[in-house]
Image (spheres, helix red, strand yellow):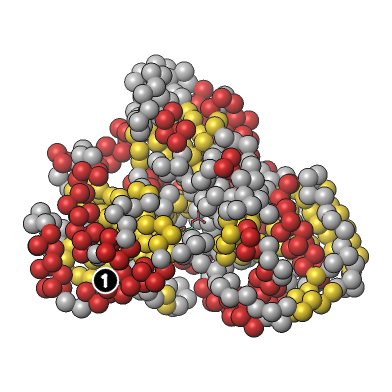
Amino acid sequence: FHVTRVETKPYEGQKPGTSGLRKKVKVFTQPHYTENFVQSTFNALSTDKVRGATIVVSGDGRYFSKDAIQIIIKMAAANGVRRVWVGQNGLLSTPAVSAVIRERVGHDGSRATGAFILTASHNPGGPNEDFGIKYNMENGGPAPEAITDKIYENTKTIKEYFIAEDLPHVDISAIDVTSFGGPEGPFDVDVFDSASDYVKLMKSIFDFQSIQKLLSSPSFSFCFDGLHGVAGAYAKRIFVEELGAPESSLLNCTPKEDFGGGHPDPNLTYAKELVACMGLGKSNSQDEPPEFGAAADGDADRNMILGKRFFVTPSDSVAIIAANAVEAIPYFSSGLKGVARSMPTSAALDVVAKHLNLKFFEVPTGWKFFGNLMDAGLCSVCGEESFGTGSDHIREKDGIWAVLAWLSILAHKNKENLDGKKLVSVGDIVRQHWATYGRHYYTRYDYENVDSGAAKELMAYLIKLQSSLSEVNKIIKGICSDVSKVVHADEFEYKDPVDGSISKHQGIRYLFEDGSRLVFRLSGTGSEGATIRLYIEQYEKDPSKTGKDSQEALSPLVEVALKLSKMEEFTGRSAPTVIT
Ligand code: VG1
Ligand code: CO
């Protein structure tokens, strides 16, 4: 093949957000748009991570992935990359990409130094929906801000990109290595099985035998919803082939380019089928729901955990995993190095860390901040309120891992019960946890696609308000006398304890005397307008008061949040788009 230099001009707005660049497909398919971003990424990396290097390209299989893969292969060849690794059919979950970077050794002994992950995660897919590109580094984690800032700077000045236009279309549907000759020597495209490296890693972490016993017990039943995302490919291999769950326990586990027209977001709003199957929501099905249910998002890094008629909040989930990991999961048997959560995630994990005397970290939203802690050996288990849970086995959150972690805890707690005794249920485990550690009532209100100007004004207003706490407390008193008072308010700022880098403007916090919190943030993953996220949390230590409905328990605080922020006045919205 030959290298062609193509002249181009910058596009505005190619700034990677919380997790890569996410835009409508129609934006990505503009002439040179995708190429500009890919070249800007190559130019942001050190030469040794490009020339002669091995990089991974794959994703959740959403619409435009197959075209983007061919473009990136051609540009990689032209930029002097030695090998491109592609999951069969271009499919690799985000956690599997992380595992492949860290674990896979090529047939010639090569190892990958980075990856283009093609996904917009939980955002819908299809010709009129979202596409995304994210770059991950040698440790398997998302590029840190220093790199994403550089990528963005490059997109603003780009004049040219390089592409091997005459490189033939590579068949990515069959497992095979194809070699090409270029001006600098050979270039290989290695198409490999999407699941095997990941499955091997999971088997080294969990006790598959004990999970298999649980799944095959007649008293246990299980249901997993892949929401038509890439998780299905892994669910089949792991839950059915390895662990013996019946095929019928899988819902929507064939990956589709448009996720069946749905929103591949594992929460109570979008995972409708699973929610109904688990006896939650408005369904009045007569069938007895399964003991355990779970779902993952489009790229399979998020998870939702459900019990029979029971919802586990993600903030509780990570706390419960941390509290039980050492006993229930072989990978952690020698202890946890530390735990971490994102700032808006509830303090349930903090309480566990305190009880177990574990190192604890609070980082900004987005997985990239956990990676440094893990690389430095400071953190084993971490999570976010946004249905993200994971550990230092890779450098991404991991939906299937979270499901296996819960199955391990259930298997451990029910070791003696599998021959017909009453099972300890998901609900029992959570209630027991609240009894020991107290409960953090928690909810999140999302206002999607709000006018960007209005969203900024609301945030600016809240920051200004923070300058006088007495004024804030006066307003709150006028709204509701039932809530405690604000004792501290700020804009969250994080100093990375490993590299000392500082991340500013990471969300506005109002901290109350009784441990309650209100957090306001603007989303960094949307593709249109602005999304305001409002996080509401209240701590209850008294075991006699931990059984309330959470929306009910939080309603005074919600009222305060909405009125204090003048939400309706600024946004014109009388209700959020989604409540989780
Ligand atoms: C959201 C979540 C954040 C998560 C990010 C990526 O970001 O709040 O916790 O890490 O999505 O998740 P934001 O900036 O929109 O609030 V995924 O599964 O979409 O890659
Ligand atoms: Co995701």
* Amino acid tagged 1: Leu
In the image, farthest residue toward the front: 572
Q: Identify the residue at horizontal 75%, vertical 76% (top origin).
A: 161
Q: Identify the residue at horizontal 63%, vertical 58% (top origin).
A: 25
**On screen, 300 above or below 276?**
below
Q: Where is residue 322 in the image (x, y as percent from the top left)?
A: 38, 48
Q: Where is residue 1 in the image (x, y as percent from the top left)?
A: 90, 67
Horizontal side, residue 487 vs residue 301: left or right: left
Quick one: 193 or 156, which is closer to the camera? 156
**On screen, 435 above or below 457?**
above
Q: Identify the residue at horizontal 51%, vertical 22% (top origin).
A: 216
Kind of element beneath mark 1: helix
Quick one: 510 or 405, which is closer to the camera? 510
Query: Which residue bears the numbered disc 1?
Result: 462
Q: Identify the residue at horizontal 41%, vertical 57% (top origin).
A: 448
**On screen, 197 above or below 527?**
above
Q: Is residue 124 visible?
A: yes
Quick one: 5 or 1, which is closer to the camera? 5
Q: Where is residue 194 in the image (x, y as percent from the top left)?
A: 69, 46
Horizontal side, residue 327 vs residue 392: left or right: left
Picture quadrant where residue 337 is located: bottom left
